[in-house]
């Protein structure tokens, strides 16, 4: 079996660019596969293929069972095929399929933040330098000086789905929440600014243990069994161990900020916010997640007209057209206003 490796000269057709009638080639990850039978009883193989721009369904009509035995879900395939339209969706018919056993450029399959990790870290450090409390300053510095943690923190996505679900997404989201918190604290000077800035930095640190990222974003065993809120408090406790003079009450407040930042039990918080700064952090985190997630939803929406496709998470359609077209699309909102799902 051939073992191709990825290079900058290897042709790759991005899934988002595939049009009916196109010849398609490149490296794609297998999201899922399933065998089926035609009405005549012949076996065929359906494969969901993905790159960082989307996913597409592909068919293998000949020797389907033998071809299916060559690979598994999560493998990368080097394929050639042609694009057709079936029920108004692009579908590939594969003429060649080989499993890639060598190293693959993961940037084919995972998006990255458009922001420079180094620049974001520098901005985050600058924001954290505004903290005056010596105990909080010492705590945050322990994270910045932990090379292993920072390596993961710079690379990690912020979520598997919906918001900041790309390499560097956790750092980008954290920096954004810190920026929001800074402005809120300026507007409401009675808030504990130092506590809020530290909480904004710490709130999602557990995601470096909750998520894995290689060719796709997945939950680790720790992520499924424990989750990032609890993992975040455990990471915090590890850093607090070396700070003997750290006030117990302040440590408890930081833990509460992490544990309560999803806001409600139904969204995964074991505790609901029980002091003002915790409530503010929850709202800032929720705002940044929704603005990023909905922005990405609008960018990827392929529907023509005034309204987006139906968004299952928010249980509604969203307006994307101008005011002159609102009346034409009013029917799109008839399923609106159901219960909103969790973002995380």
Image (cartoon, rainbow, N blue to C red):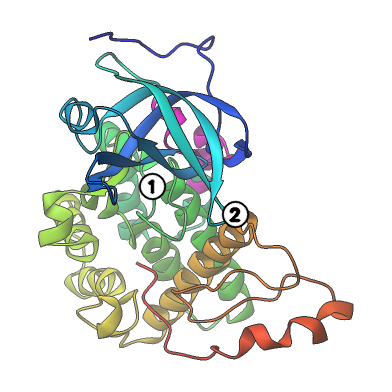
- Counting from the top left corner in percent of width and height, residue 198 is at 39, 61
260 versus 302 height, above or below: below
Q: Which residues are magenta?
A: 106-124
Q: How many marks?
A: 2
22 versus 136 height, above or below: above
Q: Is residue 204 or residue 227 the one in the foreground?
A: 227
Estimate how packed mark 2 is, as few (under 14), some (14 to 19) or many (20 or more) residues with alpha carbons within 10 Å.
Answer: few
16 versus 275 height, above or below: above
Tell me what residue is drawn at x 37 percent, y 38 percent. 59
Residue position for label 2: 300
Q: Are marks 1 and 2 in contact (CB under 8 Å)?
A: no
- Counting from the top left corner in percent of width and height, residue 214 is at 30, 34
Q: Secondary structure at mark 1?
A: loop
Tell me what residue is drawn at x 46 percent, y 79 percent. 280
Q: CA distance from mark 1 to mark 2?
A: 19 Å
Q: Is residue 128 magenta?
A: no
Tell me what residue is drawn at x 39 percent, y 70 percent. 343
- Counting from the top left corner in percent of width and height, residue 146 is at 27, 36
Tag of residue 224: none
Which of the 4 image quadrants contains residue 253?
bottom left
Q: Is residue 115 magenta?
A: yes
Which of the 4 image quadrants contains residue 300?
bottom right
Q: Earlier in the sequence, mark 1 or mark 2?
A: 1
Tell me what residue is drawn at x 49 percent, y 38 percent. 112
Image side of residue 116 versus residue 273, left or right: right
Tag of residue 157: 1
140 versus 2 height, above or below: below
Image side of residue 262 versus residue 299, left or right: left
Q: Is residue 241 visible?
A: no
């Amino acid at each position: 079996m051939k073992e191709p490796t990825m290079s900058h000269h290897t042709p790759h057709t991005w899934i988002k660019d595939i049009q009916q009638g196109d010849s398609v080639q490149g490296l794609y990850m297998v999201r899922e596969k399933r065998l089926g039978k035609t009405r005549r009883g012949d076996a065929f193989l359906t494969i969901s293929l993905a790159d960082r721009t989307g996913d597409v369904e592909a068919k293998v009509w000949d020797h389907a069972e033998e071809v299916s035995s060559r690979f598994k879900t999560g493998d990368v395939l080097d394929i050639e095929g042609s694009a057709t339209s079936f029920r108004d969706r692009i579908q590939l018919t594969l003429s060649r399929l080989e499993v890639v056993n060598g190293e693959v450029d993961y940037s084919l399959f995972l998006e990255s933040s458009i922001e420079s990790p180094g620049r974001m870290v520098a901005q985050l450090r600058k924001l954290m330098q505004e903290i005056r409390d010596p105990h909080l300053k010492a705590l945050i510095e322990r994270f910045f000086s932990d090379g292993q943690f920072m390596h993961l923190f710079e690379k990690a996505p912020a979520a598997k789905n919906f918001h900041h679900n790309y390499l560097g997404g956790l750092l980008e989201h954290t920096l954004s929440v810190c920026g929001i918190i800074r402005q809120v604290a300026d507007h409401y000077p009675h808030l504990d600014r130092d506590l809020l800035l530290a909480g904004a930095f710490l709130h999602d640190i557990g995601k470096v243990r909750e998520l894995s990222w290689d060719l796709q974003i997945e939950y680790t065993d720790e992520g499924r069994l424990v989750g990032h809120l609890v993992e975040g408090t455990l990471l915090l406790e590890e850093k607090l161990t070396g700070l003997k003079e750290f006030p117990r009450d302040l440590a408890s407040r930081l833990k509460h900020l992490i544990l309560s930042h999803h806001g409600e039990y139904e969204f995964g918080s074991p505790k609901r916010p029980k002091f003002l700064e915790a409530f503010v952090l929850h709202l800032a985190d929720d705002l940044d997640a929704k603005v990023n997630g909905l922005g990405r939803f609008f960018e990827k929406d392929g529907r023509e007209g005034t309204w987006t496709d139906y968004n299952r998470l928010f249980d509604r359609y969203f307006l994307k057209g101008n005011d002159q077209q609102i009346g034409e699309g009013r029917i799109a909102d008839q399923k609106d206003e159901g219960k909103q799902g969790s973002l995380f």
